[in-house]
Image (cartoon, grey):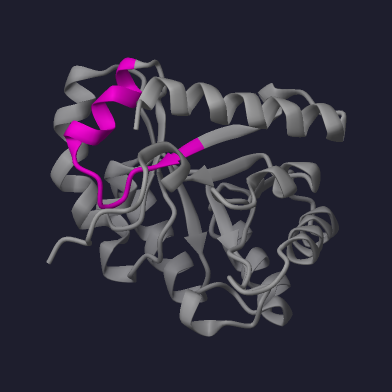
Amino acid sequence: MNAALALTEIHDRIARACKIARREPAEVSLIAISKTHGPEAIAPLLDAGHRVFGENRVQEAAAKWPDLRERYEGVELHLVGQLQSNKAEDAARLFDCIHSLDRPSLVTALAKAFDKIGRQIPCFVQVDVGEEPQKGGCPVADLPALLAQARDASIPLIGLMCVPPADLEPAPFFAFLDKLARDNGLGSLSMGMSSDFETAIMLGATHVRVGSALFGERAAPPR
């Protein structure tokens, strides 16, 4: 897959979806999900000018991104996978945004980590819109309390994130997340992946997480 051509195609699809939704393409941040892909696969996208990437695992990101960041300026790295509380400090040092804040213990761990390193990382709260606990995410009923705790701990909250059930139409879940964000005074929505990001954009997504449409089929996870 030609990285530059794939990137241009995704930007064109974002622009078309924004036109239909009467939005500006600049309102949507494309996060290239580079999990399981090595530097040799990531570099062509960097060479093509893309700078916003997402990873699922702290350990994997730590193994490949420091060297890439030395070679390419302006990289913005997002953690989109579940975060263990004992990895909070490592994540705070490595990432520029966290999409998976989902429970009180992680609020506590991140607040401690931010204070320790003197760096505040913008966070999305992941919401379990499909009632699938195995995916992570705060239960909808617990969202107001978690947001209040995070705000009390001075966590910089910027929006909500979701991963809809894979076997259901995603639009109702995206619309629900948009309503939850508006009801709670949050302006950003991390939703939409390779198969459904255009739908997400039409329903308010500000950050779309695109992997296979940019990199091709995912490589086998590292052991």
Q: Quadrant of residue 160?
A: bottom right
Q: Determine whether 86 is above or below 52 in the image.
A: below
- Residue at 81% x, 59% y is 175
Q: Residue furthest front?
A: 1
Q: Is residue 211 at all visible to an observer of this figure?
A: no
Quadrant, the C terminus: bottom left
Q: Determine whether 147 is above or below 181 in the image.
A: below
Tell whether 38 sits left or right of 83: left
- Residue at 44% x, 22% y is 5
- Residue at 58% x, 52% y is 195
Residue nearer the viewer, 2 or 107: 2
Residue nearer the viewer, 115 or 22: 22
Q: Quadrant of residue 87?
A: bottom left
x and y percentages locating residue 52 in the rendered image: 43, 31
The magenta region covers 31-47
x and y percentages locating residue 145 in the rendered image: 68, 74
x and y percentages locating residue 102 in the rendered image: 53, 69
Tell whether 106 sits left or right of 163: left
Quadrant, the N terminus: top left
Residue nearer the viewer, 81 or 164: 164
